[in-house]
Image (cartoon, rainbow, N blue to C red):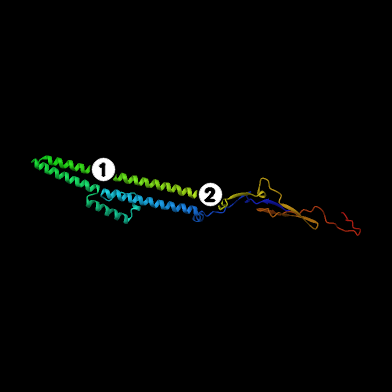
Amino acid sequence: MATFTPNPVASPTRTVPGTPFDYNAWYKNDPTLQALLGQINAAGLQQGTTLASGAQQIYGRLGEMPTNLSPELLRLLGPEQQADLQASVSAGNQAGTSALARLGYDYRLGQSQATNRLAGMGALRSGAYGQESAKNLRALTLSQYDTRLGAADALQQLQRTYQTGQDELAGKVGEGVTASQQRASELGQLGAAPRTVTNPYLNPAAPKQISTGTAIGSQTTYEPKPTAGNYLQQPGVAKTPHAAPSKIPSLGFRALR
């Protein structure tokens, strides 16, 4: 009879690949998610506008252009915004309303008053004038430092507020995407995941009989079942359980050898 042995490369299990799900297409066509993203984008733009305008106000009041700005603020303060800031700084300095302009005015006024006072005392050429000038210059330097430091602190606070807002918006985006995925799952839109299936005919630990008898005339042969995938048919001798009758008598009885 025909015999069958497992193909050495056969495996009792196989992985059926899953059907990928096009998340990008789903997100683009999810009206709830798109509405949320529209609101988030608008809020993000407003936060950027607040940061840029706040920086312009801080340095406009200070009276000088900022240096060593963060990359984010440099991106928000484009050429047009920087031109507006420069105009505001120049106008404040010319009018004497900026912080640094007022400090400069106070310093010059103090120097003038010291000169007049010492001149009236006849001590203008004494060492008292040098001491008074040094005192006024030191006061100016410290005031300028404190004013610039206050502007830098105010800008850092603006940037922290901006970053906190951006982080909150990013969290809302993540929540919206998760909710969109959940809606796709509830609607049965997600693709099939890969799965492993087992073929019992390819289990080398307990192989099943995979042939069936077929009677043809006086012989019985065995043909493989169609489900015997990955099995190799080995040459064999066809089984002959009974010999064919050698003669059929006229009386209808079968002659036996």
Secondary element under disc 1, as helix, strand or loop, is helix
Task: Give the x, y percent position of residue 94.
Answer: 22, 52
Secondary element under disc 2, as helix, strand or loop, is helix
Task: Give the x, y percent position of residue 114.
Answer: 14, 42
Decide which of tag 2 and tag 1 comes sooner along the chain: 1
Instruction: Name the residue rendered at 40%, 47% in the picture.
Output: 165
**Label drawn at residue 110:** none
Can residue 124 be seen in the rendering of this structure?
no
Image quarter (top left, top right, bottom left or bottom right) of the C terminus: bottom right
Quadrant of residue 127 within the rendered picture: top left
Cβ atoms at labels 2 and 1 below 8 Å apart: no
- Front residue of 3/120: it is 120
Rounded to the nearest whole Å, what is the CA distance between mark 2 and mark 1?
A: 54 Å
Q: Tell me the kind of residue under disc 2.
A: Gln
Can residue 53 be seen in the rendering of this structure?
yes
Near mark 2 (Cα within 10 A), the count class, few <14, some 14-19 or many ≥20, is: some
Q: Which residue is mark 2?
A: 182
Instruction: Name the residue rendered at 37%, 51% in the picture.
Output: 48
Q: Which residue is mark 1?
A: 146
- Front residue of 147/204: it is 147
- Front residue of 47/75: it is 47
Q: Tell me the kind of residue under disc 1.
A: Asp
Question: Outermost residue toward the left?
Answer: 122
Tell me if 26 is positioned left or right of 96 in this view: right
Question: Outermost residue toward the right?
Answer: 251
